[in-house]
């Protein structure tokens, strides 16, 4: 099992999760975070830290797409290990449906 970041992180990008990760397995895109599934130790400390509830265990049904997406972008985006402010629109975007299709950016973030 690993944890994956899902749709609700897009255009929120809270980074509370990266601050508690003991193995620094988060990677940063322009408007989204991902978890490297080969680095995640399945400890679960990140899941309750996400204000947007966007982190899920990959054992939940229907998360195959997100596992693949996390793996793909974790291999090309920069590592992030420090908490930063969320995106300015985070509160208004939290809970919007279909954010991947509408807003996902493949551009990398700045990382540490």
Image: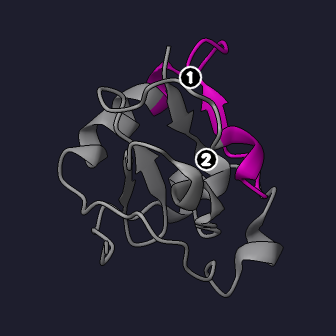
Q: Tag 2's secondary structure? A: helix
State the mark number for residue 13. none
Closer-to-camera residue (73/100): 73
Res 91 → quadrant: bottom right
Inter-mark Cα distance, 1 to 2: 10 Å
Where is residue 55? Give x, y as percent.
64, 40
Answer yes or no: do the residues labelled 1 and 2 have beta carbons within 8 Å? no
Please determine whether, in this image, residue 37 is positioned above or below residue 27: above
- The residue that label 1 is drawn on is 63
The span shown in magenta is: 47-66
Closer-to-camera residue (108/51): 51
For the point 52% across and 23% down, the residue is 42
For the point 38% across and 50% down, the residue is 24
Question: Which quadrant is the C terminus positioned in?
Answer: bottom left
Q: Is residue 30 left or right of residue 21?
A: left
For the point 47% across and 44% down, the residue is 22
- The residue that label 2 is drawn on is 7
Where is residue 23? Give x, y as percent.
39, 42
């Amino acid at each position: 099992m690993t944890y994956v970041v899902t749709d609700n992180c897009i255009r929120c990008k809270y980074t509370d999760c990266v601050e508690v990760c003991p193995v620094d397995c988060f990677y940063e895109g322009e408007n989204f975070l991902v978890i490297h599934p080969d680095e995640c130790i399945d400890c679960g400390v990140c899941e309750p830290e996400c204000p947007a509830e966007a982190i899920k265990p990959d054992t939940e049904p229907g998360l195959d797409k997100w596992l693949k997406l996390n793996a793909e972008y974790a291999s090309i985006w920069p590592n992030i290990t420090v908490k930063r402010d969320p995106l300015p629109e985070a509160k208004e975007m939290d809970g919007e449906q279909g954010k991947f299709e509408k807003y996902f950016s493949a551009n990398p973030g700045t990382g540490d």
